[in-house]
Image (cartoon, rainbow, N blue to C red):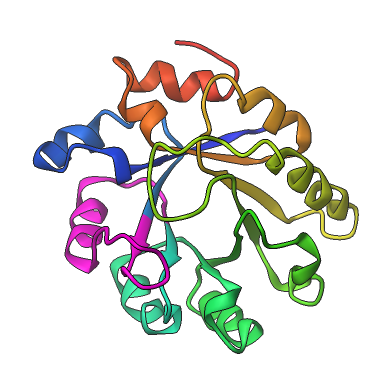
């Protein structure tokens, strides 16, 4: 199984961003949490910082929109060079239309599921998705404790891969060396990690440990 790791820069030291990004050579994807202070109670960063990160790395960029109006972000993020993009279906009236818009711009489209949002809400949109982002904490803050019920949610989505074999499962929130193997066994394809990576002494070792390997 080819497990990918997405390093979430939410926990990076932005005063030395270029150095932090350079230390992420072992990661597969760079994950960006865009927060608006409305859908979630926190603000993170906007287009200028995303553009800066795009210039600092050739890694695929994965934007998670924790905002009330994700449709307003799509075209600008596409121009910057985002390759993956997910939004929360509670924030839009027409998820199908937005997914099609994202895909028309050559970006992988995903929907993020909050801890209290059941998998069943994806039933009619799942055939259109490239990935599902399973939130294993309530969105809005880094360094939260992993919610154990996430495992069963990943298993539920994994069972649907018989119908949609190209669907990927991404998990974000409290992912670390203690729970990564259980998530992989449940069917996760992409593990997002922020504080576990940026709080470590060796980013490459932390990243590879999430895959079950070491450097």
Question: Can the viewer see residue 56 in this picture?
Answer: yes
* Residue ID at (40%, 64%): 40
Picture mark count: 0
Q: Does residue 95 lie above or below 198 as drawn?
A: below
Where residue 68 sits in the image (x, y, percent)? 43, 78
Where residue 174 sits in the image (x, y, percent)? 50, 35
* Residue ID at (9%, 40%): 15
Horizontal placement of 58 versus 7: left or right? left
Foreground: 181 or 4?
Answer: 181
Q: Does residue 44 lie above or below 21 as drawn?
A: below
Horizontal placement of 157 versus 68: left or right? right
* Residue ID at (50%, 68%): 107
Q: Which quadrant holds the C terminus?
A: top left
Q: Is residue 167 magenta?
A: no
* Residue ID at (17%, 64%): 48
Q: Farthest residue to the top: give it.
A: 215
Give the extent of the magenta segment: 33-62
Where residue 53 sits in the image (x, y, percent)? 23, 51
Q: Which quadrant holds the N terminus?
A: top right
Question: Can the viewer see residue 1 in this picture?
Answer: no
Q: Which quadrant of the view contains residue 81?
A: bottom left
Foreground: 5 or 33?
Answer: 33
Foreground: 206 or 36?
Answer: 36
Q: Does residue 77 lie above or below 101 as drawn?
A: above
Q: Is residue 55 magenta?
A: yes
Q: Farthest residue to the left: give it.
A: 15
């Amino acid at each position: 199984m080819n497990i990918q790791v997405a390093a979430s820069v939410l926990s990076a030291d932005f005063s030395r961003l270029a150095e932090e990004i350079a230390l992420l050579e072992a990661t597969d994807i760079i994950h960006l949490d865009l927060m608006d202070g409305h859908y979630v109670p926190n603000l993170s960063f906007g287009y200028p910082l995303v553009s800066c990160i795009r210039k600092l790395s050739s890694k695929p960029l994965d934007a998670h929109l924790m905002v009330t109006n994700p449709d307003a972000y799509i075209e600008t993020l596409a121009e910057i060079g985002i390759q993956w993009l997910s939004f929360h279906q509670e924030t839009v009236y027409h998820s199908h239309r937005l997914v099609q818009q994202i895909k028309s711009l050559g970006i992988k489209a995903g929907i993020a599921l909050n801890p209290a949002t059941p998998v069943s809400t994806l039933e009619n949109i799942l055939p259109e998705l490239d990935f599902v982002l399973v939130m294993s904490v309530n969105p809005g803050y880094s360094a939260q404790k992993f919610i154990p019920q996430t495992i069963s949610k990943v298993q539920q989505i994994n069972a649907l891969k018989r119908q949609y074999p190209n669907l990927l499962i991404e998990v974000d929130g409290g992912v670390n060396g203690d729970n990564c193997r259980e998530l992989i066994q449940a069917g996760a394809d992409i593990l997002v990690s922020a504080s576990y990576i940026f709080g470590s002494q060796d980013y490459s070792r932390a990243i590879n440990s999430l895959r079950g390997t070491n450097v």
